[in-house]
Structures are given as C-alpha cells and as structure tokens.
C-alpha cells in the first residue's frame, strides 16, 4: 500500500508519518539526528516539518539498466523504481533549498535561476570508460557553476576503494559531503533525501554534523540504507548543533 510508511526514528524531530496510516518502529542502534521512512515520498512529504534543504539523487526518467553491457553478468542490482517514467521535480520546489542530481535529464521542468554543479568522475582526458564522464546537479540557490573532480569509474575510485556499490547509481560519500558544504548548510541543519537509495546522503550528513530525513520506497534499498547508516552511527555519536 503506497499510503503506508514505516519510520525509523532517532531524532525525535523533523517529521511524522501519515496520520493513522503508518506503523511506528522503535529506534535501533545508537545516535540521533536521523529519521528514516520506508514508503512513497509523495505520501510522506506532506507531513514533514523542519526541513532546511532537500539534497537528493532521484530517478532521472532514463530507464537505466545496470544489467546491460559487457559486464552485465557482474551486476547485482535491479532497475531503479520509477526510472522508466519521466521525472517531474515539482513536488520538491516548495522547500526552501533544493539540490537535485541528474537535473539535466529534466531541465525543462526546472524553474528559472539557480546554479549548476558538475561532477567530473574520470578526471583525466582520454580515459576509456563505458560510463558517462560527468554528472550534473541543479541547486535552487546561487548563481555560479561549481565543479567536483573525483575519480569514480568502476574499480578506479578516489575513495571507498574496495567497497561494493549497493545501488546501481550510488554516489561517493565525498561528493554528497561537498554538496552540503557548497549549499552552505549549517551544522545541525535538517537535510531531506526523499529518494534515499542506499543512504549515501545520510552518511554525508552524519559525517558533517547535519540531521537527516531519508525516504525510500524500495524495501531492499531501504534496508541497505538503514544498515549503512547504523554502521556509520556506531562509529561514534556526533553532538548535533542546535
């Protein structure tokens, strides 16, 4: 049922599930500053309060298939839910600040203004890779384009070397940390990722002292995100700012 969502609460702040249609799950692990919801973000968003910014990597509407290509037999990932349909970001524009990756794929649906970020993920010229060499994000506030250069091409990685990706379009934690800094979000700010995937934005928030609300409708990815975030929290408790 799309109207039902599940909440993992560690903050006591930031949001609540739909009135009468959600199941409360008691906190697990340690730490605070994190709220996780299993459900459709369109059902959860109307009930959230206290969000300072949305930072997300939604389905782009490109029907990306991680199982195609010469390395398809090595892929462990299914297709991204919702990626077969054109993405419309209109439900996010009501938030004060918004940063959306993949926005070049639905740029005609963006409002005027804002700024563009780009991620150069091969870093060097002439590198023969089967992936796109860059990805783009749109930021609601600001005017100057900004770039992040960070190698992330298959086994060639500038960070998280040797770690398996848990999502077909997983981003580096360092990239999402950079986004939080470029967006000038204060320590203690509440960041929402309504398309949480494997939880990378949440990990970036924990490492930089921001509070996090994550929503994910795919149960498999939700459990992956919860596990990754719990491992991150278990490494030590951060005293969040007010």
Image: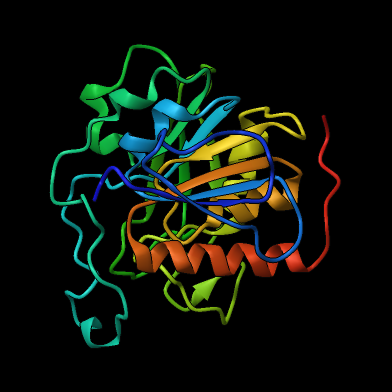
Horizontal relation, residue 225 to residue 202: left or right: left
Residue reaching furthest bottom?
73
Query: What's the residue at 52%, 36% (across, down)?
Result: 16
Which image quadrant for residue 30? Answer: bottom right
For the C terminus, the image quarter is: top right
- In the figure, is residue 195 to the left or right of 151? left
Q: Position of residue 185 (x, y in %)?
A: 68, 29
Looking at the image, is 78 positioned above or below residue 217? Answer: below
**Rendered location of residue 84, percent (x, y):** 13, 51
Q: Residue furthest front?
A: 20
Q: Residue at x 38, y 20 (%)?
A: 93
Residue for point 45% across, 28% down = 47
Instruction: Point out residue 102 in the picture as x, y percentages from the top left corner.
Output: 34, 42
Tell me if residue 163 comes above or below residue 201 in the rendering: below
Specify how the rendered protein is coloured: rainbow
Q: Going 83% across and 63% down the picture, which residue do you hit?
A: 236
Choose between 128 and 25: the one closer to the eye: 25
- The percent position of residue 122, horizontal first and vertical second, equals 45, 61
Left of 96 or right of it: where is 136?
A: left
- Asked whether residue 116 is in view, the answer is no
Report which quarter residue 183 is drawn in. Answer: top right
Residue found at the far right of this picture: 239
Q: Looking at the image, is 23 positioned above or below residue 235?
A: above
Q: Is residue 160 left or right of residue 33?
A: left
Residue 117 in sight from this viewpoint: yes
């Amino acid at each position: 049922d799309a109207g039902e969502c599940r909440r993992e609460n560690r903050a006591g702040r930031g949001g609540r599930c739909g009135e009468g249609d959600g199941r409360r799950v008691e906190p697990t692990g340690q730490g605070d500053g994190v709220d996780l919801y299993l459900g459709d973000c369109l059902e959860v968003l109307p009930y959230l309060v206290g969000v300072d910014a949305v930072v997300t990597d939604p389905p782009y509407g490109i029907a990306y298939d991680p199982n195609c290509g010469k390395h398809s037999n090595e892929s462990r990932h299914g297709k991204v839910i919702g990626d077969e349909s054109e993405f419309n970001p209109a439900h996010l524009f009501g938030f004060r600040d918004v940063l959306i990756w993949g926005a070049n794929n639905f740029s005609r649906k963006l409002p005027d203004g804002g700024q563009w970020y780009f991620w150069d993920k091969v870093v060097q010229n002439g590198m023969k890779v089967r992936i796109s060499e860059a990805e783009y994000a749109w930021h609601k506030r600001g005017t100057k384009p900004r770039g992040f250069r960070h190698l992330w091409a298959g086994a060639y990685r500038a960070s998280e070397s040797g770690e398996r990706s848990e999502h077909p379009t997983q981003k580096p934690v360092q990239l999402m940390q950079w986004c939080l800094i470029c967006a000038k979000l204060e320590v203690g700010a509440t960041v929402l990722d309504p398309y949480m995937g494997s939880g990378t934005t949440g990990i970036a928030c924990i490492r930089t002292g921001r509070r996090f609300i994550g929503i994910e409708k795919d149960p498999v990815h939700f459990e992956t995100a919860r596990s990754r975030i719990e491992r991150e929290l278990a490494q030590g408790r951060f005293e969040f700012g007010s």
